[in-house]
Image: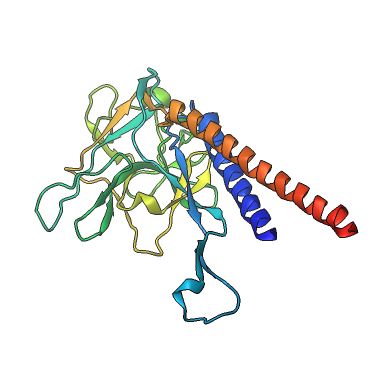
Amino acid sequence: MLRGLYTAAAGMITQQRRHDTDTQNVANINTPGYKQVNSVQRSFPETLISMMGGNPDSPDRRIGKLNTGVFAEESLSTYLGGTVNETGQNTDFALVSDLRVTDPATGQPMAFDESGKYVSPDGQVTYKPEAFFTVQDEEGNIRYTKDGHFRVDGAGQLLSSLGDRVVDNTGNPITLTGGVSALKVNEQGQLVNALTGTPTGVNLGISVIDRPNQLVRQGEGNFMLDETDGAAARYMQAGDSVQIRQGYLEGSNVDTAQTMVDMTAALRAYEANQKVIQFYDKSLDKAVNEVGRV
């Protein structure tokens, strides 16, 4: 009987985490560059139930399989692009990318699904590369973000909304000599002279991540790259299908309607597991306080 309590309790914990994930998505609907998080649930390994006694090798002795619960295995980010909205501010930037990968078996571009994943006929999984702004925190650590809502401080440094230094394609912080009015960037990410339109030799540090599924959220829209499985980052090169749009911001990619449906489903599943626990509690109460007296 206690096994049922543990199974229902595991279900409640899983649905609570699922609900928390959906709540986080809803709270960041208006956050520039926010990427939706999806909670992945997985069941515990099944166990084979057999009758006690009798011939252990007899197939009639086996009752069947029992699942002992479920748990929230991980949270996966979806890197689909959000809606690009015009703001008219010089310090706002949006990335529009459509990076392609060629299938070595066919020589054709891979057809990625909505989650940015391609599964080959032999089961090999490839993720669509994504472009990110590159910033440097106070400790000098490199981070990646889709939030292009930048600002310029009194020293002329280009900073992210969190105060991290925006770096160029050599990894050095960008410092402007003419203030905000001198900030002009073309679609290739090159800083240009605001009057003549000629490149200044400085490029925004746009990083291309080949395996965005291995990015680790650091909070506030920042990611770090987990390189333990060979994931790599490189700066944008000529020919990459990436455009930088000045005066625009990328919105979040949260699917509001689906998220609300998921929140409701998580709540209903939580309540169902709660009722199971209440049933077991009443059954135990009856067994201890009524049957035990006889």
- Give the answer, above or below, for where 219 lies relative to 4: above
- Residue at the (53%, 59%) spot, across then down: 67
What is the quadrant of the C terminus in the image?
bottom right
Q: Nearer the viewer, residue 147 or 19?
A: 19
Residue 60 position within the rendered picture, expressed as x and y whole percent measured from the top left = 47, 72
Q: Measuring from the top left, give residue 30's x and y in whole percent.
A: 49, 25
Quarter of image, res 184? top left
Can you name the residue that lies furthest to the right here? 293
Quarter-of-image position of residue 146: top left
How many marks can you see?
Answer: 0
Viewer can see residue 149: no
The residue that appears at 65% across and 51% down in the rendered structure is 9
Please tell me which residue lies in front, 64 or 97: 64
Report the front residue among 147 and 180.
147
On the question of residue 288 being in view, the answer is yes
Residue visible at 54% across and 54% down in the picture: 70
The N terminus sits in image quarter: bottom right
Q: Position of residue 112 (x, y in %)?
A: 24, 44
